Amino acid sequence: MKKLYVLFFLSLAIQSSFAVLTVQVDERSELLSIVCRLAGYGEYVNNNVKSYTEEIDSYFTPYSKLPLIDYAKEIRITNNIAFDAISSLIPFMRIINKKIVFTQDAFKIISEDDHRWNVNMLNKYAVLLNDFYKKTNFNRFFSKHSSFYEITKTRFNETIIPTINLSWFDETFGVNNKNFHILLNLCNGKSNYGPSNNEDDHYAIIGVSRLDSLGLPFFNDFDLQVVIHEFCHSYCNPVCNKYAEQMLPAFEKLFPYVSKTLIKKAYGSSSTLMYENLTRLTTLLYLSNQEIFDLMKLRNDEQSGFPWMENLYFFYINFKDNREIYPDFESFIPEYIYFMNEIANQIEKIMCEYKSKIPRVVSVFPPNGSTVSSKVKEARILFNVPMRLAVGVKPLKDNPESRKVCLQPSNNTLSSTKRTIIIPISLEDNTKYGCILSTFFRSEQGYDAEEEYEWIFDTK
């Protein structure tokens, strides 16, 4: 077993024969996130860490008219500079003697990897970023919060670091001696990113959004999955770029069928679908290898716009079981490309099969829109598929008649077929009832309902 030496200084460093891992709240990441916050980038606005964001607004609002903020607003509109376009700068940035410096050829590399940027834009952004950094005395603000950053890092280190297996990346992708950097960002909210510098540095930028009763950040198993996902991007994106000519046509066919779901997650193109598909697959492979895979993680991917993921996951077991033939992940890519082309050719059938698995209300009793006796003692919800026992009920969104909610999520039972949820109710005479059956309902196979159902009825 490989020995890990853990050092707690300003950041945690884990060294092994495979890699080095650092964890920190990073000044570069906080700087760019605060700029985005001032420029109104919704994906970078996180008010969950309330005391911290209140101090950000108090300190930086007087600087919101600096040229950088106006330029950030402009390029968001003209060039879609948002989300990962911002985080992609971090691996190429350094802060030296309180000045922001970009590595040699950084602008050329960034603009070639991400066509939203060009060299002239990056030059101007860098100049204005330095101006903002200097005039706001950003380092003073950052240093002032060092104790809060340390608490955040320590909690992450204690909870997540012992569960990370860095050797898996080398064993799977066949590339050794990489540097892994986890940046805990207190402004990103639920957004997470996985940029790299195309060399030896892989980043997982993790948005911190959950606080305990003391107002301090805390972490759980979900954060581990996010870290692995973002690190996988550093491996998968270059592979996708290398084989884009053969790989992208399948995703161009697939995108129209899943675009509605993907756009909600800011995955707005077939190329993004291509990157995300391979990254989600490798994340599942990691979880399976570490014996922390469960069906709900797979179902989440399917319902996030990748309805073929179960088929793809089981297809990729062929890679796992034939490592003597496929010594690294890239060697299996031709088979992956062939499989995704098959998926694209069968997408209408796949979508039909997928939709048939999603829980959908078929009928209700009392019937929707009916008038029934107040002596009815049971409400029933019939679904198209066998269900798990759960009830998700919300008040009506528009309720001018002040309809009452009569359903309660307790003492409920399932019919023998498991397709009907039976709910005891107590009704009053001459009363109007109504509620919304939410997407909380989950099928026996682990799929969540995707559409709400409005249910109203009256009593005599």
Image (tube, rainbow, N blue to C red):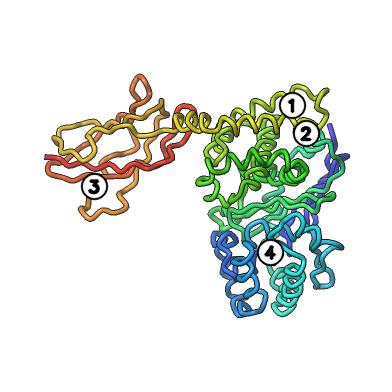
Q: Is residue 392 visible?
A: yes
Q: Earlier in the sequence, mark 1 or mark 3?
A: 1
Distance of mark 4 from mark 2, alpha carbons?
A: 34 Å
Which disc, if any, is residue 319?
Answer: 1
Q: Nearer the viewer, mark 3 or mark 2?
A: 2
Identify the element where label 4 is drawn: helix
Quarter occupied by residue 186: bottom right
Q: Which residue is mark 2?
A: 329
Q: Residues within 10 Å of mark 2 (few under 14, many from 20)?
A: many
Mark 1 touches mark 2? (CB < 8 Å): yes
Q: Earlier in the sequence, mark 3 or mark 2?
A: 2
Q: Is residue 159 visible?
A: no
The one nearer the camera, 4 or 18, is 18
Q: Earlier in the sequence, mark 4 or mark 2?
A: 4
Which disc, if any, is residue 30?
Answer: 4
Q: Earlier in the sequence, mark 1 or mark 2?
A: 1
Q: Earlier in the sequence, mark 4 or mark 3?
A: 4
Distance of mark 3 from mark 2, alpha carbons?
A: 57 Å
Residue shown at 34% from the left, 46% from the top: 394
Distance of mark 4 from mark 3, alpha carbons?
A: 47 Å
Distance of mark 1 from mark 2, alpha carbons?
A: 8 Å
Q: Which residue is mark 3?
A: 404
